[in-house]
Amino acid sequence: LLELSGTGAMVAVALPEARVREDLDAWDGRLHVAVVNSPSSTVIAGETEAVVRLAKDYEESGVRVRRIAVDYASHTPHVERLRGSLASA
């Protein structure tokens, strides 16, 4: 995972997956649903700047947001770059 270090971010938001997916459409693939924790909690991951901006927008509209302590976009296409090295190992 060191190869991915510094390449992304993740936040949990207190919104249902369907609502989050609608909001992510505007981000042109820069953000992804990484995990659905419950019917009212979804984790978003992607490019750091995009995650930070969307999290700020949610917070300003009263949505609870919690930053996850990682610096890569786990559970998204961002980790595909590891496929070759993992397959070789």
Image (tube, rainbow, N blue to C red):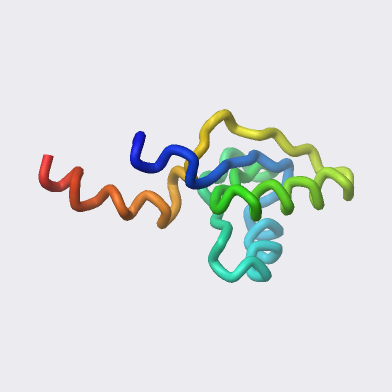
Instruction: Locate residue 85, reporting x and y percent.
Output: 19, 46
Vertical arrangement, residue 16 with respect to residue 70, above or below = below
Residue positioned 48% across, 46% down in the render? 7
Residue positioned 63% across, 53% down in the render? 17
- Hey, which quadrant is residue 67 in on the image? top right
Left or right of residue 36, residue 58 in this image: right
Instruction: Locate residue 88, reporting x and y percent.
Output: 11, 45
**Depth check: 6 or 87 in front?**
6
Left or right of residue 26, residue 81 in this image: left
Instruction: Locate residue 74, reporting x and y percent.
Output: 45, 43
User: Considering the image in quadrants, where does the N terminus appear?
Assistant: top left
Residue positioned 88% across, 47% down in the render? 60
Instruction: Locate residue 27, reporting x and y percent.
Output: 64, 66
- Hey, which quadrant is residue 50 in on the image? bottom right
Residue positioned 83% across, 43% down in the render? 59
User: Considering the image in quadrants, where does the C terminus appear?
Assistant: top left
Left or right of residue 88, residue 56 in this image: right
Q: Residue lying furthest left in this view?
A: 88
Vertical arrangement, residue 8 with respect to residue 19, above or below = above
